[in-house]
Image (cartoon, rainbow, N blue to C red):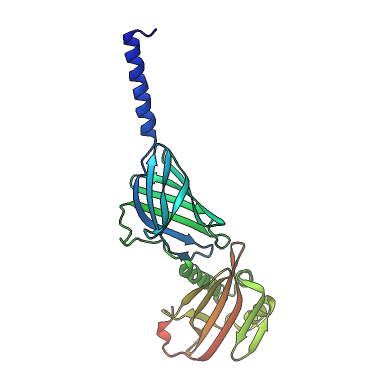
Amino acid sequence: MFHSGRLATAFLAASILMRTAQGQTASVEGKWAGILDIVHADGSVAPNSAYLELKQKGSTVSGTAGESVDHASPISLGTISGNQLKFNVGINSGTTVKFDLTLDGDHLRGSAAGSPSEAGSRIVVEVTRSGDATKPVAHLRDQLYAIVAELDLKLFDAYNHCDLATLGKMVAEDLEFYHDKTGLAVGRQVFLESVKQNICGKVRRSLVSGTLEVHRLAGFGAAEMGTHRFSHPGQEDNVGEAKFVHLWKLQDGKWKVTRVISYDHGAAVNASLNR
């Protein structure tokens, strides 16, 4: 039989243990709003909104999740352990999206998996406990334009310096090159031989500032468009200009040009606009 002092001590210890255990389970109760952005392998971002309304009882979490207050679905299997929150959301009869988020103050950050998307894509979730689903949020920055601009710079740096090895790595073996003056040329080797014979030491290419456009091609890569200039060493007045389209294919993490259209060749209007 417990002595009264020992009994009091036992109750005190149990109370401390309960408070400690409760303290280890963070609270995610409340309304959360932010982003659910799909980041594609090509660097482009499909921005989406996220809205969570969560209820918590111990380590069990329930509630709804979706893109807005009016477009939300019940969550299931919601649990929180320490600062790690996990739950599922059924978006239709055959698809379940699994969320894996980390609590940091009034922020939940992490990922979601299971939503139909292109290979190599990932879903980034970042929400803030505020309850204001109408407040503007900052989405992830789309990187596709910067990626293709850097590819263009690398490709034509090799072109201008007769770096045929680099050029060869950046164009597809079955490259198709359409030119309004010379027609169609097919194949990587044909392209490299043409550069060696007609470009090396004779022509320098520059992109006209402000003309570059980049457009995503879902599941393939990107279309690059713009205007470029071609100057000739020792011939300052001989500057040509043309429009171009490059189709870049992303495969196994590598970008290569598969198609080129070079057209509307003529004299440059204002050579001072070169990059």
x then y, percent, for residue 34: 37, 57
**For the C terminus, which image quadrant?**
bottom left
User: How many numbered marks have been drawn onto this rendered protein structure?
Assistant: 0
Which residue occupies 65% across, 86% down? 184
**For the N terminus, which image quadrant?**
top left
In this rendering, position of residue 243 left or right of residue 251: left
Viewer-proximal residue among 194 and 217? 217
Q: Quadrant of residue 247?
A: bottom right
x then y, percent, for residue 222: 54, 72
Viewer-proximal residue among 174 and 25? 25
> Can the viewer see residue 112 in this picture?
yes
Which residue occupies 36% across, 16% down? 10
Viewer-proximal residue among 126 and 244? 126
Q: Is residue 271 above or below residue 131?
A: below
x then y, percent, for residue 114: 54, 55
Viewer-proximal residue among 169 and 262? 262
x then y, percent, for residue 179: 60, 87
Q: Is residue 15 above or below residue 51?
A: above
Which residue occupies 45% across, 50% down? 75
> Can the viewer see residue 233 in this picture?
no
